[in-house]
Image (spheres, rainbow, N blue to C red):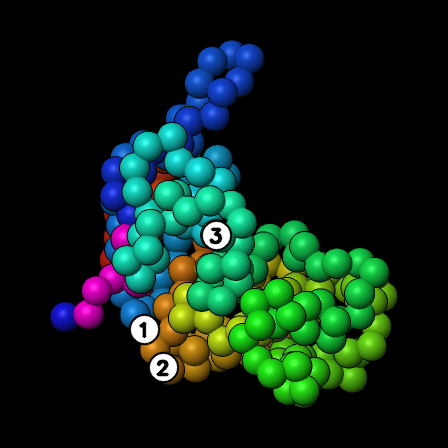
Amino acid sequence: MADPRIEVRALHKAYHTSAGDFPALRGVDMQVWPGEFVSVHGKSGAGKSTLVNMITGIDRPTSGEVFIDGVSIPSMPDDRLARWRGKNMGVVFQFFQLLPSLTLIENITLAMDFSGMYPIKERQDRALALLEQVGLADHARKVPSKMSGGQQQRVAIARALANDPRLLVADEPTGNLDSQTAAGILDLFEDLVERGRSLLVVSHDRELSQRAGRVIEIEDGRIVAAGNGR
């Protein structure tokens, strides 16, 4: 059997507040395998986004381990982690995080510039092809402020795929999309899974859960259930 793409062991995260420590994650153990599409569900404040931040290395755990393809994420220094993540992981943030002064195509090519994954002469064509996949090639030279929230979300998904990552981690990737556009994005996600990529998605989208191979329920910082999504 292949090794897990994501392996989380005894993961704890507590935030220090004026009222005392707040435990956001309480001993989470989970695995995601190559070619698996996993959806994480839970109420607001359950710990979903904290879990995503631990897996992507955006934040550090209080204790426990996160391995991606056998690489320990918490043990890497920030500068090395940023470059490793750029080459190996695509991240879709809930609030897009597009650079406002760059055009859509520049936002995507920047991800390739940072990691050096593709020859310089190929990057623009690849970025345009990714915008075509999310239906925005005609807007490639516009800046994010000229686009709707749903359109910016699609650009964020295209940017996350810029370096053809083995793992895509997304926080509410279809939350700002109409049903038809969301269905197209889910088709794209399923195609990635068929090509051996792994997806971990936090979402309240019922259709996304139905398409996922496995659904994980998180409550009060603990995984309380896991089962097939289909």
Image quarter where the N terminus lies is bottom left
Q: Secondary structure at mark 3?
A: helix
Magenta segment:
2-7
Q: Position of residue 18 (x, y in %)?
A: 55, 13
Which mark, residue 194? Answer: 2
8 above or below 194? above
| CA gap, disc 3 and disc 2 | 27 Å
95 above or below 142? above
Q: Residue 35 falls in which quadrant of the image?
A: bottom left
- For marks 1 and 2, the one nearer the N-term is 1
- The residue shown at (46%, 44%) is 77
The reply to whether discs 1 and 2 touch (Cβ–Cβ < 8 Å) is yes
Residue bearing mark 1: 35
Q: Position of residue 193 (x, y in %)?
A: 38, 76
Which mark, residue 183? Answer: none
- Mark 2 closeness class: few <14, some 14–19, many ≥20 residues within 10 Å: few
> What kind of residue is marked 1?
Gly
Which mark, residue 81? Answer: 3
- The residue shown at (41%, 60%) is 200
Q: Is residue 24 left or right of residue 6?
A: right
> What kind of residue is marked 2?
Glu
- Magenta-colored stretch includes residue 4: yes
